[in-house]
Structure formats: C-alpha cells, structure tokens
Amino acid sequence: MRPPSQPVELLVCTRCRRDGEQAGDVERPGAELFRGLSEAAIDGVDVTPVECLSNCSRGCTIALRGAGRWTYVYGGFEAGVDVGTICEGVRKYVDSTDGLVPWRERPEHFRKNCIARLPPLSVAMLGEG
Ligand code: FES
C-alpha cells in the first residue's frame, strides 16, 4: 500500500477532441473526461488537468505518476464510456509499490493503449542541477 505522504497524480488532457471534431461551443471530450474522473474521487489520487500530453490524434489521454513510481501515458479513451475502466486501472496503480501493475492484471484498454512509460526519477537524479 502507498504511504499517504506520496500521492498518485492522474493527469488528464482537457484539450483532446474526437477525430475530425472542430473547435466549437461543445465541451471537449478531454474536459468531460476530466470532470468525470474528478467526480469519481478515487481515494489517494489527485486529478490534475493538463493542456496536451502530445498524443492528440488517439482519443482522450491520461498519465499516471507518483514519487518512486513508473509513469504511464495511456490514450484512446472515450469520455462518456471509459471512466470506470480508468478508475479500475488507477486503483491498481495506487495499490502497487512502484507503479508496475502485472500486465495481465491491467484493464484490457490499458494493455492495448499504453503510449509510453518512464522509469521513476532516482534520488541521485533529483539532486543534480
Ligand atoms: S490535445 Fe490531448 S494529448 Fe494533445
């Protein structure tokens, strides 16, 4: 279980659109997804809006990160459909010690739509200027 002093952060791109969608008055799917995940109030997770995770052409995009944890970027989400799937994957990430959830235990969408993963920052790297 994660120590309470080391929160997990769920970044949600609020600028993502559907394929072919033009700018307009409607709420962007990314903003809708951010709202849904904020309302889900996943225990131990800070939900943070961001403006682009550089995965713009592959559906709504999120990233998971935390101190001492691997960082993951996932895409291909639909705002009105995938909040439950994301919550399931995030809870498993929170329950891991280092962000590494066994592949078979991840939600199928996470297995098929991982855009990138980055290793944790080491203490030595944090001390370098
Ligand atoms: S606009 Fe969402 S990843 Fe770029």
Image (spheres, rainbow, N blue to C red):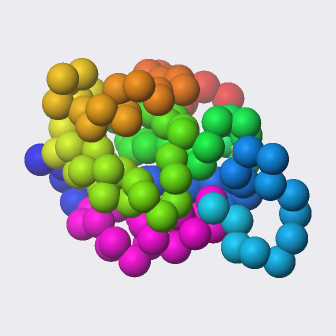
Q: Which residue is drawn at 49% across and 36% down?
A: 74
Q: Which residue is drawn at 51% across and 47% down?
A: 77
Residue farthest left in this picture:
1
Counting from the top left corner in percent of width and height, residue 25 is at 83, 77
Judge whether 116 appears above or below 20 on screen.
Answer: above
72 vs 99, left or right, is: right
Answer whether residue 46 is visible to the viewer in this image: yes
Answer whether residue 120 is visible to the viewer in this image: no
Counting from the top left corner in percent of width and height, residue 125 is at 53, 24
Image quadrant of residue 129?
Answer: top right
Q: Residue at x 31, y 58 (%)?
A: 84
Judge whether 11 appears above or below 73 on screen.
Answer: below
Which of the two residues, 32 or 64, is positioned nearer the viewer here? Answer: 32
**Is 23 contained in the magenta span?**
no
Residue farthest right in this picture:
23
Image quadrant of residue 30?
Answer: bottom right
Which of the two residues, 76 or 120, is positioned nearer the viewer here? Answer: 76
61 vs 122, left or right, is: right
Which of the two residues, 129 or 21, is positioned nearer the viewer here? Answer: 21
Counting from the top left corner in percent of width and height, residue 50 is at 66, 57
Counting from the top left corner in percent of width and height, residue 67 is at 38, 42
Q: Which residue is drawn at 54% across and 26% down?
A: 115
**Is 39 contained in the magenta span?**
yes
Q: Residues in magenta?
A: 30-51
